[in-house]
């Protein structure tokens, strides 16, 4: 194993993503529990806290996904409201950071800032917000304003919502509430929390109602890959949830985003880069590889294989045999995607289709096996010690600052990792053996604002 | 005689604006989760039906329209729904009914948030739906401007039109929230390995609501909550608020005779249960001290009771004769008046057989004696 002498060892950041609406979540396994009962969230979060994880993470999607005009029925469907669940989890955990994805397009900053600051109070300084920007008209059909926002404006709106939220969080000085009975002074000013914000997207004024929260400002996470997305993160985020989980793409992404920070007057340590990652553990490498394949077959049912193929071909392929060959015709290049409610997956469908065909003929794969081959291979497959070594290597070689782990099972999917890998990371001296702070910013070594 | 239903309304340090200055109050703790948890546990020890938690999308003010500039009153609040969520997993029976404004919020979000609270509490969620007509709160959203109005201009046609619009929007909001709760049938999740399907999409329903202020497509992103329909409630001072499609209406009678009139009117409009709001001070000396500290006698939209527990029991039992289903008591000082309700008032009501000695249900619908909620979208079985 490479040693990076001279440089102090970086500490690994670990977060736990509650598996949800996605075909990586296996619902057909006998061990798969409820995706909605609070007990699943409680058990998953408590497992993360037992493993001294930095934070728990929840995704969001504001409209049920559709394919070919019908609600997508093959993956897990249905989830709770993120911030509400996090407030519940604050009651049954003590140190774990509690972060949730909340859309900046279909929420108003006053209400959102209020909820996040409230969550920070109710959790004793453990709140975090993953700022996402989906702005499609399809999702807009569930909201007052409809599909009002041009895609090009998604990050200008998000940045302004975030900046406005910060202005609101900063309105109450830490010592505003005195609650001095004798003097009869509850707050230093008669009407605290005054603000005025006038900008391109948001024009509001008045008084914020939540006293300054323990972290000052909840942790800000960004998840998005475009140039404006990266720029937004480099300027405004404390952490990034990235898609770049391999060593090479991780290092390139890390260098790119951290390289943008100086221009915004920030130090690279102020932004933690955390790729989404999956893991499969075995007592031997062979066992882990075999398990990984079994899980991939659970994740890609015959029906799911056709569905994923349709997302590239942008066309009804329900007459194709999942065990048979790929379509002989090319993908349909149409702006109007057959899939609604999730982000576009392929930049160049024709090129991807060519690659898939080549791979299928080279290895003699039918549709389902091809899909298993080309989508969502697990990030870390191996024994606990090899996985711990790989994670350490990724972090020390600046492919990441840590990982947001996405297990494939609810609620027990994290347990193996907590029991097997965490102790080895602790032995290596790159992961805490106990919490040394009580706030999320504290765990990440980021200053309270 | 059937038992009363009893709720308490939690707000800051209590409903008296100087409550936080009472030696028994805990003004340093108002923004801490422990404060709220201990209040709700106290109410649960009393076997109350539910607690409501006050909220608003603006600063507290003694004035009808703008702010009041007073530093000697409690200012600031945490989000009530999140307080309820924080308390839910560590309480077991009591209903949790946060206030959520309808005027500026998204019915889609409100629906999933309340459904989630129902999951966190396994069937104890409710909602106090609240209209906001205040211009200062509208300015926090910057999307609509409201005319400033006060008691004097209240009857002017422009103000009346504004208010009518707000109540129409409130009814639409509640309708959308309810439809979204029903948009998943209870057995929509099938996990059918043979066909590879997690859900039966025929049991997920678009709600296709179109109204003056918003249109909502649906279905919800959250499966139907444990109660099917969590309990919807509203405080109302006139007919406009009696008729919003809620399960409970809190009304503010000033006398037995007035209670009888109101009950008759609400009953003529629909099946909602009627609770009377009463502000409660169970220590007259404390109330007098706080009035003095505050520089004015306390007044309220609701009847203010000051006296001992026996007198309050008598009042509740006599008002009940008008057909009221229950009361929402607003403690003047927290936790003192809540303690007195639990330890002094409830034993007297129990001695009269007018209040439960223990919970007989685990859901809020159960406490209220409401049947399982029918799903408006579920196909009824057709028998051949
Ligand atoms: C790892 C990752 C996770 C994401 N999770 C969510 C999510 O839970 N909800 C959501 O609405 N968008 C999610 N997104 C979408 C992004 O937040 C972003 O809004 C979208 O990708 C558009 O931005 P972009 O063009 O910069 O990628 C995720 C993106 C990434 C990379």
Image (tube, helix red, strand yellow):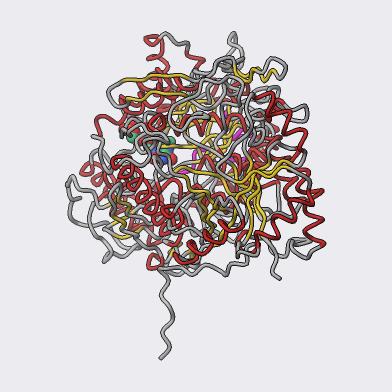
Frontmost residue, A48 versus B188: B188
Screen quadrant of the C terminus of chain A: top right
Task: Identify which residue is drawn at 23% across, 48% down.
Answer: A337
Frontmost residue, B271 versus B100: B271
Percent of width and height locating residue B316: 69, 56
Q: Is residue A381 magenta?
A: yes
Above-or-below relation of B74 to B128: above
Residue found at the very far bottom of the displayed protein = B384
Percent of width and height locating residue A329: 17, 55
Image quarter for residue A186? top right
Is residue A244 among the parts visible in the rendering? no
Percent of width and height locating residue A194: 46, 19
Task: Identify which residue is drawn at 82% across, 62% down.
Answer: B351
Frontmost residue, A200 versus A421: A200
Q: Quadrant of ligand 1?
A: top left
Above-or-below relation of B293 to B282: above
| Left or right: where A166 falls relative to B255 | left
Is residue A98 among the parts visible in the rendering? yes
| Left or right: where B33 falls relative to B164 | right
Q: Is residue A127 magenta?
A: no
Task: Identify which residue is drawn at 54% across, 36% down.
Answer: B79
Percent of width and height locating residue B299: 59, 36
Image quarter for residue A73? bottom left
Above-or-below relation of A3 to A298: above
Q: Count the marks: how many?
A: 0
Q: Magenta stretch: give its range.
A: A377-391
């Amino acid at each position: 194993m490479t040693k990076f002498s001279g440089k102090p060892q970086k500490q690994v950041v670990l977060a736990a993503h509650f598996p949800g609406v996605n075909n990586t979540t296996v619902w057909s396994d006998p061990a798969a529990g409820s995706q909605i009962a609070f007990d699943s969230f409680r058990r998953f979060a408590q497992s993360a806290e037992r493993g001294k994880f930095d934070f728990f993470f929840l995704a969001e999607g504001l409209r049920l996904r559709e394919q070919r005009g019908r609600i997508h029925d093959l993956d897990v469907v249905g989830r709770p409201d993120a911030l509400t669940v996090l407030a519940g989890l604050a009651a049954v955990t003590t140190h774990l950071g509690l972060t949730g994805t909340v859309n900046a397009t279909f929420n108003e900053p006053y209400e959102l800032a209020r909820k996040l600051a409230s969550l920070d109070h109710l959790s004793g300084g453990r709140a975090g917000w993953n700022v996402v920007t989906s702005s499609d008209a399809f999702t807009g059909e569930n909201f007052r304003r409809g599909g009002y926002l041009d895609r090009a404006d998604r990050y200008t709106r998000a940045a302004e919502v975030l900046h406005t939220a910060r202005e609101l969080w900063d309105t109450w000085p830490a010592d505003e509430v005195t609650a001095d009975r004798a003097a009869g002074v509850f707050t230093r000013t008669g009407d605290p929390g005054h603000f005025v914000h006038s900008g391109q997207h948001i024009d509001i004024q008045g008084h914020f109602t939540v006293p300054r929260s323990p972290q000052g400002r909840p942790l800000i996470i960004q998840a998005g890959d475009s140039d404006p997305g990266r720029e937004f993160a480099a300027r405004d985020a404390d952490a990034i949830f990235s898609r770049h989980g391999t060593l090479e793409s991780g290092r390139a992404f890390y260098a790119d985003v951290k390289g943008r920070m100086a221009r915004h007057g920030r130090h690279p340590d102020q932004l933690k880069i955390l790729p989404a990652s999956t893991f499969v553990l075995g007592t031997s490498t062979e066992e882990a590889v075999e398990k990984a394949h079994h899980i991939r077959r659970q994740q890609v049912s015959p029906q799911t294989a056709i569905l994923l193929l349709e997302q590239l071909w942008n066309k009804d392929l329900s007459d194709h045999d999942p065990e048979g060959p790929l379509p002989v015709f090319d993908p349909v290049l149409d702006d109007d995607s057959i899939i609604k409610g999730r982000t576009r997956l392929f930049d160049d469908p024709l090129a991807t289709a060519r690659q898939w065909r080549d791979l299928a003929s080279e290895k003699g794969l039918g549709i389902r096996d091809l899909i298993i081959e080309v989508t969502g291979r697990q990030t870390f497959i191996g024994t606990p010690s090899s996985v711990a070594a790989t994670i350490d290597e990724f972090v020390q070689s600046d492919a990441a600052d840590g990982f947001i782990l996405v297990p494939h099972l609810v609620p027990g999917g994290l347990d193996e990792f907590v029991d097997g890998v965490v102790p080895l990371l602790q032995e290596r001296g790159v992961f805490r053996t106990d919490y040394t702070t009580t706030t999320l910013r504290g765990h990440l070594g980021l200053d309270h604002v | 005689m059937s038992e009363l239903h009893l709720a308490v309304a939690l707000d800051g340090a209590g409903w008296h604006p100087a409550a936080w200055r009472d030696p028994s109050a805990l003004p340093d703790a108002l923004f801490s989760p422990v404060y709220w948890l201990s209040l709700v546990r106290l109410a649960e020890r009393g076997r109350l039906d539910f607690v409501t938690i006050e909220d608003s999308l603006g600063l507290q003010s003694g004035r009808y329209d703008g702010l009041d500039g007073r530093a000697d009153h409690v200012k600031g609040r945490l989000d009530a729904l999140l307080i309820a969520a924080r308390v839910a997993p560590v309480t077991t029976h009591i209903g949790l009914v946060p206030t959520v404004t309808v005027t500026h919020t998204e019915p889609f979000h409100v629906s999933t948030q309340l459904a989630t609270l129902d999951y966190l509490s396994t069937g104890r969620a409710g909602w106090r739906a609240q209209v906001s007509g205040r211009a200062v709160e509208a300015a926090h959203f910057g999307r609509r401007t409201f005319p400033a109005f006060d008691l004097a201009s209240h009857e002017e046609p422009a103000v009346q039109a504004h208010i009518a619009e707000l109540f129409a929007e409130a009814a639409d909001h509640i309708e959308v929230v309810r439809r979204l709760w029903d948009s998943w049938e209870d057995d929509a999740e099938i996990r059918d390995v043979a066909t590879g399907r997690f859900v039966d999409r025929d049991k997920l329903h678009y709600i296709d609501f179109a109204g003056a202020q918003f249109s909502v497509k649906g279905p919800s992103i959250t499966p139907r909550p444990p109660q099917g329909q969590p309990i919807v409630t509203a405080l109302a001072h006139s007919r406009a608020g009696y008729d919003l499609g809620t399960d409970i209406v809190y009304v503010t009678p000033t006398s037995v005779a007035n209670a009888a009139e109101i009950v008759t009117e609400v009953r003529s409009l629909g099946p909602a249960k009627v609770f009377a709001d009463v502000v409660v001070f169970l220590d007259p000396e404390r109330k007098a001290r706080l009035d003095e500290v505050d520089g004015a006698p306390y007044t309220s939209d609701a009847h203010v009771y000051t006296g001992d527990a026996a007198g309050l029991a008598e009042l509740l039992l006599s008002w009940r004769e008008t057909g009221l289903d229950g009361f929402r008591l607003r403690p003047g000082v927290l936790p003192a008046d809540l303690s007195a309700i639990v330890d002094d008032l409830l034993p007297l009501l129990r001695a009269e057989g007018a209040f439960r000695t223990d919970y007989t249900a685990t859901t809020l619908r159960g406490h209220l004696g409401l049947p399982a909620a029918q799903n408006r979208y579920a196909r009824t079985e057709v028998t051949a």
